[in-house]
Amino acid sequence: MTDRILGVACVLAAAVMALAARHYVADISYEPVGPRAFPMLLAGLLAVAGLWLAVKPSPDATDYRGLPLKQVAVVLGAVFGYALCFEVMGFALATTLVAVPVGMAFGGKPLKCLAAGAVLGVGAFYMFDRLLDVVLPMGWLAPVLGAL
């Protein structure tokens, strides 16, 4: 029964994502697909997976009573904080900082989580910015990241 509940929740989340993304448009159209393609694709995949869970759950469905709710709450709060800080702080710094509570929720040490987050944040920023030509916000680190 818990798989069906999760499946319905995924379908509802996909509907909210699709509704939010339907008005995404670029001021200047320089790409053939535009900014709404990726969120709509993710919403579609999430809806299909949710429908699969709702219609045909596994016979050995997991019972979520033993779920570590404290760690789930920490990760959920970190993701919401990431969404709030992303524009102002910038991709690299926000990604670095979100890695600390998420890593610690999975048993990591604070300094190792911070170091891994810094490598992930700066590395992914340069991969997207330089290799894939995807513009990400630099935020507070603009003087440093722009100079490198």
Image (cartoon, rainbow, N blue to C red):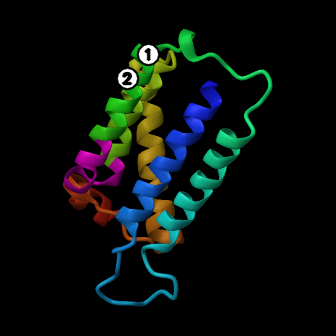
Q: Taking the image as drawn, is residue 138 in sight?
A: yes
Q: What is the secondary structure assignment of the residue under circle 1?
A: helix
Magenta segment: 82-92
Where residue 39 sits in the image (x, y, percent)? 47, 64
Compared to residue 95, the image places residue 45 above or below, namely below
Real-space Cα separation, disc 2 to disc 1, in angstroms: 6 Å
Instruction: Tell me if 10 is positioned left or right of 22 in this view.
Output: right
Magenta residue check for 143: no
Q: Residue at x 40, y 14 (%)?
A: 70
Where on the picture, by quarter, is residue 18? Answer: bottom left
Q: In which quarter of the image is the N terminus?
A: top right
Q: In this view, does 90 lie to the left or right of 119?
A: left
Residue occupying image coordinates x 77% and y 30% = 58
Find residue 73 and name its label.
2
Residue 62 in the image: x percent, y percent?
A: 67, 20
Q: Where is residue 42 in the image (x, y as percent from the top left)?
A: 55, 59
| Quadrant where the image shows the C terminus | bottom left
